[in-house]
Amino acid sequence: AATAAATVDEADDDGDGSGSGGEEKVEGGGDTGASADDSEAVDALAAGLKALSLTNGRINRMTAAELRAELTRLGLEARGRSAVLSKRLKAYYKHKLAASLPPTAAVPAPLAAKHMYDYVCVLDFEATCLEDVDAFPHEIIEFPIVLVNCDTLEIESTFHAFCRPMVNPVLSEFCKTLTGISQESVDQAKTFPNVLKDVDQWMNDCGLSDRRYIFVTDGSCDFRDFMTIQCLLSRIERPAYSEKWLNIKKMFSTRFRRQGNIHTMLDMLGLTFEGKLHSGLDDARNIARILQQLLRDGLRLAGVETLDQFGKLRHALDFRSAEAARLPQLQRTGSKPT
């Protein structure tokens, strides 16, 4: 039977709208025994991708006011900078095309609405620190997680705990001012290994043991640096779920070709920061808001970061397979805390 294959890369957003397809490619199988349904599916996909290319070209020529007007007409979020509005509108028409294709059509991955992951755990550590001192044994003192359902895009649960530092148990004035964490809060908190046990219990209570999930962080340092240092200091093995993650900054810069911090990303989306900056929980909630809007706008969760055997950061090349979304084990192994 004939097969229909298509690739639609993010680069097609920059096409001229000529209808030539740009990066789009549609191939029909040459089997003379192809059914009429297969042939119609290939034709429908080719026609749809051509129309999508023309639509993208039209959107590229729209002003910010025109973009907002069309988004409002369609009942979509109209806040944000022009680059965000353009991506949002293009994503709408991509998903509309996917929904209109016949069941026998091979829907390109960028058009598919289903996410690889069931849940995303948004995390943002706060750690002990000194002003203008980089060579410092940072210990995690705040451990917040915001759980986002990738289907409903709702926040389903939140975990939050302070951790008692052991190497430098007294917080610096700089650290207390920056994070808003009091000495009393960490003095009364559990040690990091015991907080990890609470995290495991919370994740199991949320049903993550048999669901596909991944962590999202604001940069690489949470898992690459803070988790690595803390596990060494606590003499325990790092939890399996911290061995790969998605970097919201990298996903954002890849999508919009602009790098920035939480405030920059929120501003691009037409949002403002809620809460106190450098409060781990408030930061995690705002990162979750950024992620929720990006997912509504058609973001594909890709760009997994992980560490190699030498602790060097590396980026996985393929994130579309089921293997990439394999469940991390919640049960940890390693020495017990003393």
Image (tube, rainbow, N blue to C red):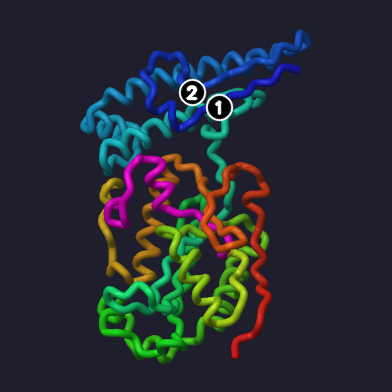
The image shows residue 154 at horizontal and vertical percentages of 46, 56
Residue for point 32% across, 39% down: 84
SS at badge 1: strand
The residue segment tinted magenta is 242-266
Report helix, strand or loop for mark 2: loop
* Magenta stretch: helix, strand or loop mostly: helix
Amino acid at dot 2: Glu
Amino acid type at circle 1 is Thr
Is the residue 63 above or below the residue 284 in the image?
above
- Tell me how far mark 2 sits from mark 1, CA to CA: 7 Å
Residue drawn at (28%, 69%) of the image: 276
Please determine whether, in this image, residue 318 is positioned above or below residue 125. Answer: above
Image quadrant where residue 80 sits: top left
Residue at (51%, 28%) from the top-left corner?
Answer: 8
Residue 173 drawn above or below residue 327: below
Which residue is painted at 59% across and 64% down in the image? 241
The location of residue 173, given as percent across then percent down, is 26, 84
Mark 2 vs 1, N-terminal side: 1
The residue indicated by pointer 1 is: 7
For label 1, the crowd category at 10 Å Cα-Cα, with few meaning under 14, some 14 to 19 and many 20 or more, is some
Q: Residues within 10 Å of mark 2 (few under 14, many from 20)?
A: some
In the rendered view of the protein, which quadrant contains the C terminus?
A: bottom right
Tell whether label 1 touches label 2 (CB within 8 Å).
yes
Based on the displayed image, in which of its 4 quarters is residue 163 positioned? bottom left
Question: Is 87 included in the stretch rendered in magenta?
Answer: no
Please name whichever residue, 232 or 254, is drawn nearer the observer in this view of the structure.
Answer: 232
State the image coordinates of residue 179 (x, y, percent, origin top left): 31, 75
Q: Quadrant of the N terminus?
A: top right
The front one of 219 and 33 is 219
Q: Which residue is mark 2?
A: 23
Q: Position of residue 61 (x, y in %)?
A: 28, 23
